[in-house]
């Protein structure tokens, strides 16, 4: 009986890892193998072979699959992550803009999107930075009262209110109440290449 060489064991492990990642990523998108294969421009049999964990795909197939799933090649080949991970508050990125505390809401970057939590003490004001042309921005008020000035328009947001506005224009946030105000800013960024083409 032939012995399994160390390099064969590594290749098998990598194939299984790739198969598990592709399977999980497809499942989280709610797509069938056939749908994902069409998006990637590969035969369904190739996709099924990838998910089996025994495939030895070419770099071009891996690249097509990564693009179809919207992930990097590194993520396709990385050891599968646990289904959940706890991020203590102190591990999330925080910065101060004057009196305002700005905390990144998610630990991992989301392509084309910034999501931040704004905490404004009474009387605090913060000027926003205009983004690339075509960017949309949303401000949701969770607590207190926030006054948003965007492109010359003034909005008074109370708890639960949301305003959608152009993020490529001048804008500012202010606490218009007596207590601490908390809001969430969601910025839908537009690639400079896309805005130039438009």
Image: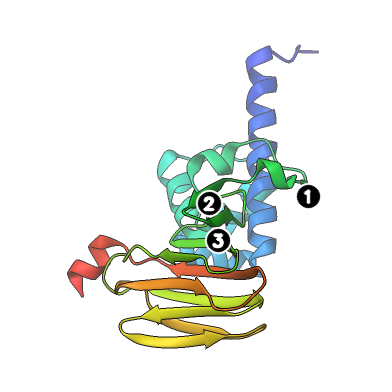
Residue that numbered label 3 is attached to: 116
Circles 3 and 1, Cβ within 8 Å, touching? The answer is no
Mark 1 secondary-structure assignment: loop
Q: Residue at x 52, y 47 (%)?
A: 95
**Which of the marked residues, 3 or 1, is nearer the chain's N terminus?**
1
Query: Which mark is nearer the camera, 3 or 1?
Result: 3
Picture quadrant where residue 75 is located: top right
Q: Quadrant of the C terminus?
A: bottom left
- The Cα–Cα distance between marks 3 and 2, rounded to whole angstroms, is 11 Å
Residue 167 x/y as whole percent: 36, 73
Query: Which mark is nearer the camera, 3 or 2?
Result: 3
- The Cα–Cα distance between marks 3 and 1, rounded to whole angstroms, is 21 Å
Q: Is residue 3 left or right of residue 21?
A: right
Mark 2 secondary-structure assignment: loop
Image height of 92 relative to 137, above or below:
above
Circles 2 and 1, Cβ within 8 Å, touching? The answer is no
Packing grade of label 1 (10 A; few <14, some 14-19, many >=20) is few
**Which of the marked residues, 2 or 1, is nearer the chain's N terminus?**
1
What colouring method underlies this structural image?
Answer: rainbow
Q: Residue at x 62, y 55 (%)?
A: 106
Residue 189 x/y as whole percent: 39, 65
**Which of the marked residues, 3 or 2, is nearer the chain's N terminus?**
2
Image height of 80 relative to 166, above or below:
above
Residue 90 x/y as whole percent: 69, 42
Residue that numbered label 1 is attached to: 84
Residue that numbered label 2 is attached to: 109
- The Cα–Cα distance between marks 2 and 1, rounded to whole angstroms, is 16 Å
Residue 102 x/y as whole percent: 54, 56
Q: Which residue is at the front of the view, 127 or 37? A: 127
């Amino acid at each position: 009986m032939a012995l399994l060489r160390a390099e064969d064991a590594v290749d098998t492990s990598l194939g299984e890892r790739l198969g598990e990642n592709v399977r999980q990523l497809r499942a989280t998108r709610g797509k069938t193998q056939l749908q994902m294969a069409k998006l990637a421009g590969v035969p369904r049999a190739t996709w099924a072979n990838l998910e089996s964990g025994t495939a030895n795909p070419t770099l071009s197939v891996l690249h097509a699959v990564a693009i179809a799933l919207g992930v990097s090649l590194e993520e396709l080949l990385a050891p599968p992550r646990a289904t959940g991970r706890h991020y203590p508050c102190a591990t999330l990125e925080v910065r101060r803009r004057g009196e305002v505390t700005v905390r990144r809401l998610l630990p991992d970057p989301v392509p084309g999107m910034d999501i931040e939590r704004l905490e404004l003490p009474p009387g605090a004001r913060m000027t926003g930075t205009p983004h690339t042309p075509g960017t949309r921005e949303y401000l949701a008020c969770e607590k207190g009262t926030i006054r948003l000035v965007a492109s010359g328009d003034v909005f008074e947001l109370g708890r639960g209110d949301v305003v959608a506005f152009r993020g490529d224009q001048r804008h500012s946030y202010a606490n218009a109440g007596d207590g601490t105000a908390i809001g969430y800013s969601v910025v839908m960024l537009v690639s400079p290449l896309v805005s130039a083409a438009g």
